[in-house]
Structures are given as structure tokens and as C-alpha cells.
Image: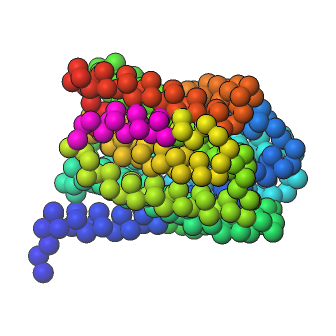
């Protein structure tokens, strides 16, 4: 039976996506996610200790992000994706045996952050390159939405069971984070790097040349710079806030056994919004309207102490999903791709640096006004970003 080159590419893409989706699900299937912030708090850490830990995480990520992106561009992306979950598993082993010691918790964050830098840039670049080779680059935002949804579903499923297990033993929840990460490493063996196929041809640039190529990309493309500012200072705010969500749950009276259930409910809705995000790619107004509505929901979530304020808190995160996914997809499409992982990692580097200041700002606001009010002030900030995006949209520069 004769199979065309296009047919082979389509079959190859389907095989790749099966392994890719398994990886996306397992790499965030972490029981300990439901309880680790509460575990730190109950171990005696205060809001500033926790903020400092996230600052350490962001600092280490910033240091390793761009070098790891260049490493991915220079070598086989697959082996970075194999190594990352195995390194991440070490974090939970250290926390499980560390007894709540601050410096051991900090060491765990350092290791987790390093493992994350191996994934970011590599995973998105590998996905885009496979889709481009199969002639399916226009569907990247749809597949990226599924990727994010599976990550959220994996995290949400683990949060349900992690919260229930954590109610009886938080240490057990930490230990149970390890097996899925080993499974993710196994799945990564099937994530072949398409650039290394013989038919790809071409000379491989030197390791350090990727840094220069990424700098040239940002210097030459105003749309890339705009998208970076929009993502880093806008909708990526929720990557910082989600780390403090367990403190919000405590503040409004959610029992620890229900942490996983609350988080999973929010994640399920966020996953649905991620899957549907590609349907909004023809409506550029989403780029500023959804962050505006999200900011308003955060303001509402910060005005009282009722458990019902979880509803606007969840709504704010759900509304952030479509603009985040569509802006990330556009980021991949507008770059040339010569050093795709390094350029993507540069954007994540800026996010890590911004996260440091966001953590400090959140800590100051929480210390002065309380955790709930700090969420409200984050909403005011996001509204300001949305108005800036609307102003840029009126001048012809859209985030999606």
C-alpha cells in the first residue's frame, strides 16, 4: 500500500501527540500540589517565608531558563524532557524527609525550579516543530489548549486525591508525587526531536549562537516584544497567584480535606476554557476584555471573608485561560524559529524576574492588608494591564 509523505507525517504526528499528551498529564499529576503550601504554613512558616521560597524558585528559574533553552536548541530536546520529571521528583523526596525545615524546603524549590527550566521552551518548541513538519501549524493553538487542559486535569485529579490523603498524612501526599513523575520520564522517550532526523539536514549552529539569535529576534520584532510584555506582566500573573491560593482557602475557611476538591473544581473549569480557547482566535477583543473581566473578579474576591468568594476567584482564573493560550500560540507563530526554545525561554526568563517582584509586592500587600485584600489589589493591577492592552489594540497591536 502506497503511503504519501503527507500521510507518513500525519501518522507520525498522531504517535507523537499520544506520547505528548501522556507526558503533559503525568508531569503535573502531583499529589503534593494540593497541600504543600498549607504544609509549609502548618510547619511554622509565615507569609514572608513562603514568599521568599517562591522568590528563590523564580530566581533559580531566571538563572537557568535561557541557558537551558539554548541547551535544548543545541542538543536533543527529548533527553531534557526525560530528565526534568526525574529531577523534579527529588524535590518531593526532600520535602517528605525534611520535617518542615526551611532550608530543605528551599533546596526542594531550587531543584524543582531547575527541572522546570528544562521543560519550558523545550516542550512548546518540540510541539510546534512536529506540527509544522506535518503541515498543521495553524492548529497549534488548538493542540496547545489540549496540552494545558491535560496539565490542569492531571493536576486537578491529583489535587482531589492529594487533599484527601493530606487530610490524614501530608507526608504521604508528598511521597505519592514521585511515581507519576517517573511515568512522565518514561513517556518522554517517545518524544522524538524532529530536527535530528536525517531528512532535516542542515548544519547545527553552535551553543552560544542561540543566545545571539534570540536577542536578534526580540530586537527585530515589535510584535514579539509586545507579546512578551503582555504575557509576563499580564495574564501570567496567575502563575504567581496560584501558589498563594491555599492561603486564600485557609483565609475563607476551607477545611484542608477540601483543598483538593476546591482546586480540582477550578482546574476542571480552567481546562474546559483552555480546550475552547482556539474558538476565540478570530476575536482580538478577547486579548484585553477577558483580562479586564478577570481583574474585576479578583477585586470582588478580595472584599470579604465569605467562602462564596471562591466563585469570583475561580472565575478570574478561568477568564485568563483563553488570552494566555492564544497569546502563547501567537508567540510561537511570529518568531522565525531558528532558536525557538531559547527565544521561548527568554520570555519565561522575563516572567521569572517579574515573578520575584510580584511575590514581594504580594507579600507586602498581604502583610499590610491581609491575604484576601492582596488578591483584590492584584485585580486592580490586572485591570490596569487590560486597559493598556485595549489601548494597544486600538492602535492595531493585538495580543491574539
Q: Residue at x 74, y 59 (%)?
A: 255
State the predominant SS element of the stretch in magenta.
helix
Residue 165: horizontal and vertical position, in percent? 74, 69
Quarter-of-image position of residue 118? top right
Name the residue: 54% across, 39% down: 300
Magenta highlight range: 283-297
In this view, the residue in front, 151 or 316, is: 316
Q: Is residue 158 left or right of residue 41?
A: left
Closest to the observer: 172 or 339?
172
Q: Residue at x 88, y 53 (%)?
A: 99
Q: Answer yes or no: is residue 201 visible.
A: yes
Residue nearest the viewer, comparing 335 with 143: 143
Q: Position of residue 21 (x, y in %)?
A: 42, 64
From what the image shows, is residue 357 above or below residue 204? above
Residue 293 in the magenta stretch? The answer is yes
Q: Is residue 338 magenta?
A: no
Q: Quadrant of residue 215?
A: top left
Image height of 350 relative to 107, above or below: above
Q: Which residue is painted at 12% across and 68% down in the image?
A: 4
Instruction: Judge whether residue 208 can be spotted in this image.
Output: no
Amino acid at each position: 500500500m502506497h503511503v504519501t509523505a503527507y500521510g507518513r507525517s500525519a501518522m507520525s504526528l498522531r504517535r507523537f501527540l499520544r506520547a505528548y499528551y501522556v507526558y503533559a498529564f503525568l508531569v503535573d499529576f502531583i499529589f503534593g500540589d494540593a497541600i504543600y503550601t498549607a504544609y509549609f504554613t502548618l510547619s511554622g512558616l509565615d507569609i514572608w517565608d513562603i514568599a521568599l521560597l517562591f522568590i528563590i524558585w523564580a530566581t533559580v528559574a531566571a538563572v537557568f531558563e535561557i541557558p537551558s533553552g539554548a541547551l535544548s536548541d543545541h542538543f536533543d530536546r527529548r533527553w531534557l524532557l526525560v530528565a526534568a520529571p526525574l529531577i523534579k521528583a527529588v524535590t518531593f523526596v526532600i520535602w517528605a524527609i525534611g520535617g518542615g525545615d526551611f532550608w530543605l524546603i528551599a533546596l526542594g524549590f531550587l531543584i524543582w525550579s531547575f527541572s522546570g527550566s528544562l521543560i519550558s521552551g523545550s516542550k512548546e518548541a518540540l510541539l510546534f516543530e512536529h506540527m509544522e513538519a506535518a503541515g498543521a501549524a495553524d492548529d497549534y493553538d488548538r493542540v496547545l489548549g489540549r496540552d494545558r487542559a491535560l496539565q490542569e486535569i492531571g493536576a486537578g485529579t491529583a489535587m482531589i486525591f492529594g487533599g484527601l490523603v493530606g487530610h490524614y498524612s501530608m507526608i504521604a501526599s508528598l511521597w505519592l508525587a514521585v511515581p507519576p513523575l517517573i511515568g512522565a520520564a518514561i513517556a518522554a522517550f517517545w518524544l522524538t526531536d524532529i530536527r535530528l532526523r536525517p531528512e532535516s539536514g542542515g548544519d547545527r549552529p553552535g551553543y552560544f549562537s542561540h543566545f545571539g539569535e534570540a536577542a536578534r529576534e526580540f530586537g527585530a520584532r515589535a510584535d514579539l516584544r509586545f507579546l512578551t510584555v503582555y504575557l509576563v506582566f499580564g495574564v501570567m500573573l496567575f502563575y504567581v497567584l496560584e501558589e498563594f491560593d491555599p492561603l486564600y482557602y485557609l483565609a475563607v475557611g476551607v477545611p484542608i480535606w477540601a483543598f483538593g476538591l476546591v482546586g480540582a473544581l477550578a482546574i476542571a473549569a480552567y481546562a474546559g476554557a483552555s480546550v475552547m480557547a482556539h474558538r476565540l482566535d478570530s476575536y482580538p477583543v478577547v486579548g484585553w476584555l477577558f483580562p479586564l473581566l478577570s481583574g474585576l473578579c479578583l477585586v470582588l474576591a478580595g472584599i470579604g471573608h465569605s467562602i462564596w468568594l471562591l466563585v469570583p476567584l475561580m472565575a478570574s482564573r478561568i477568564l485568563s485561560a483563553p488570552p494566555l493560550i492564544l497569546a502563547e500560540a501567537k508567540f510561537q507563530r511570529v518568531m522565525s524559529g531558528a532558536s525557538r526554545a531559547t527565544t521561548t525561554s527568554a520570555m519565561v526568563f522575563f516572567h521569572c524576574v517579574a515573578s520575584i517582584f510580584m511575590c514581594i509586592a504580594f507579600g507586602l500587600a498581604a502583610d499590610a492588608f491581609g491575604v484576601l485584600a492582596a488578591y483584590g489589589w492584584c485585580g486592580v493591577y490586572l485591570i490596569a494591564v487590560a486597559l493598556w492592552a485595549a489601548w494597544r489594540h486600538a492602535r492595531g497591536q493585538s495580543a491574539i
